Image (tube, rainbow, N blue to C red):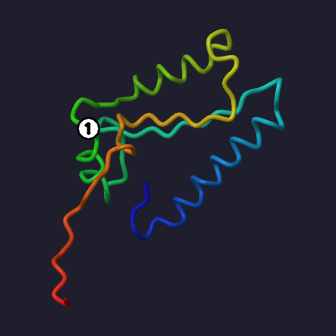
Amino acid sequence: MSEPNTESYSASKGGLLALTHALAISLAPTCASIASAPAGSKLRIIPRYGARITSSIPPAASAGPEDIAELVSWLLDGKRSGFVTGANFVIDGGMTRKMIYEEQPENPVR
């Protein structure tokens, strides 16, 4: 998801995802390369977008550090996640899959 005036953030995030994929190939089979993209109401969020972001998370979701830790624990256990590499895990309670329609000001020019 992108917000106005967040080009540098978006570009850096895209770069990290591309780096994750490239490292997965370069480091195979000795090491995995994995990224995670957490978000949630109990996590520290950029104050400028905080209320807007938390209001877009489906009501059943309430992520906290323990939710992220569960995924990281699974990923660090090579017996359970040994075949996973080059992946980005989005941990956001469905926020990025929810369609958000913000109210637009009425256009006075018709």
The percent coordinates of residue 107 (x first, y second) are: 19, 82
Identify the residue shown where x is 76% and y is 43%: 22
Callout 1, which amino acid? Pro
Foreground residue among 31 and 45: 31
The percent coordinates of residue 98 (x first, y second) are: 32, 45
* 74 is higher (above) or lower (below) than 40: above
* 69 is higher (above) or lower (below) than 80: below
Extreme residue in the bottom direction: 109
In which quadrant of the rendered view does residue 20 lie?
top right
Foreground residue among 28 and 68: 28
Identify the residue shown where x is 39% and y is 45%: 96
* 22 is higher (above) or lower (below) than 4: above
Identify the residue shown where x is 48% and y is 37%: 90
The percent coordinates of residue 13 (x first, y second) are: 57, 52
Q: Is residue 110 left or right of residue 29?
A: left
The percent coordinates of residue 78 (x first, y second) are: 68, 14
Extreme residue in the front direction: 110
Identify the residue shown where x is 59% and y is 57%: 12
| Number of other residues with Cα within 10 Å of mark 1, as a class: few under 14, some 14 to 19, many 20 or more | some
Q: Is residue 61 left or right of residue 27?
A: left
User: How many marks overall?
Assistant: 1
The quarter of the rendered structure image containing the N terminus is bottom left
The quarter of the rendered structure image containing the C terminus is bottom left
Foreground residue among 94 and 70: 94
* 12 is higher (above) or lower (below) than 30: below
Q: Is residue 19 left or right of residue 88?
A: right
**Could you say whether the residue bearing mark 1 is in a helix, strand or loop?**
loop
Q: Which residue in the structure is indicated by mark 1?
A: 58
